[in-house]
Image: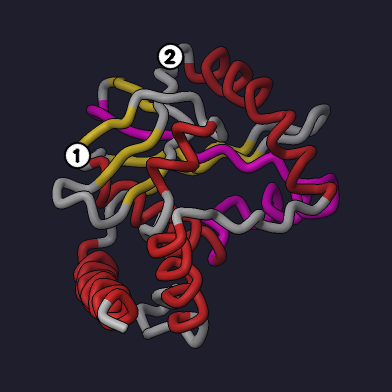
């Protein structure tokens, strides 16, 4: 893993992730069941445009997403106090070959080894749903498993936070079977992305 030292959502952060697949969008490459996603080519073409033009299109951010970003620091503090650990903030993490990456919400060391944190600050309705389910959300499987693959961490604490509600912490470990499928699909995706970019540069 290579770490790009920067503040998340800064210009340096956007530059580091421009034109490469990131774990927050791995669901566009592979489904939670390990099958190729139907969104694959749309995501591939969007990344090709970023890589060739040097411009990142503004991603849509709903009111709920913006609220989640604002609450992230508070969630990190509450998690750290609850677990009695220090959370190391990090900018952007690249795979060893630099072809894909992720932005963990923090690194943590405890008796179980070196781990990462994935904070989710949803609106009230969704927060209650996740508390009742008390497990890793299906929609986050690719991001969490992909994050552990990129960073080489031994576990990930999936955290759901909403002020006034109990804090949900689910410890997730690498799913080797899923990661094999993810690696296969990711390699294919990156090869196709390189091929499309080479083809368009030659025109």
Magenta stretch holds residue 27: no
Q: Residue at x 46, y 36 (%)?
A: 13
Q: Earlier in the sequence, mark 2 or mark 1?
A: 1
Q: Which residues are magenta?
A: 112-138
Is residue 185 at all visible to an observer of this figure?
no
Q: Residue at x 38, y 36 (%)?
A: 92
Question: Which one is in front in this view, the residue at disc 2 or the one at disc 1?
Answer: 1
Q: Which residue is mark 2?
A: 85
Point out residue 105 in the picture as x, y percentages from the top left corner: 48, 33
* Dot 2 crowding, Cα within 10 Å, few <14, some 14–19, many 20+: few
Q: Residue at x 80, y 48 (%)?
A: 64
What quarter of the picture does the N terminus occupy? top left
Q: Which residue is mark 1?
A: 1
Residue extending farthest to the left is: 97
Horizontal side of 7 relative to 163 (left or right) equals left
Is the residue 120 above or below the residue 85 in the image?
Answer: below
Asked which quadrant contains residue 186, the reply is bottom left
- Distance between mark 2 and mark 1 Cα atoms: 23 Å
């Amino acid at each position: 893993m290579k770490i790009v030292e920067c503040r998340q959502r800064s210009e340096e952060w956007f530059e580091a992730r421009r034109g490469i697949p990131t774990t927050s969008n791995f669901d566009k490459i592979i489904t939670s069941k390990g099958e190729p996603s139907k969104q694959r080519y749309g995501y591939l073409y969007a990344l090709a445009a970023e890589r060739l033009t040097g411009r990142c299109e503004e991603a849509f951010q709903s009111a709920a997403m913006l609220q989640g970003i604002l609450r992230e620091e508070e969630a990190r503090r509450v998690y750290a106090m609850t677990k009695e650990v220090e959370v190391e903030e990090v900018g952007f993490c690249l795979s060893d070959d630099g072809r894909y990456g992720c932005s963990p919400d923090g690194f943590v060391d405890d008796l179980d080894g070196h781990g990462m944190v994935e904070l989710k600050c949803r609106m009230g309705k969704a927060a209650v749903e996740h508390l009742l389910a008390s497990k890793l959300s299906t929609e986050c499987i690719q991001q969490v498993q992909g994050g552990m693959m990129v960073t080489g961490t031994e576990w990930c604490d999936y955290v759901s936070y909403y002020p006034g509600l109990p804090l949900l912490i689910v410890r997730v470990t690498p799913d080797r079977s899923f990661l094999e499928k993810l690696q296969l699909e990711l390699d294919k995706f990156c090869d196709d992305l390189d091929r499309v970019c080479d083809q368009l540069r030659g025109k």
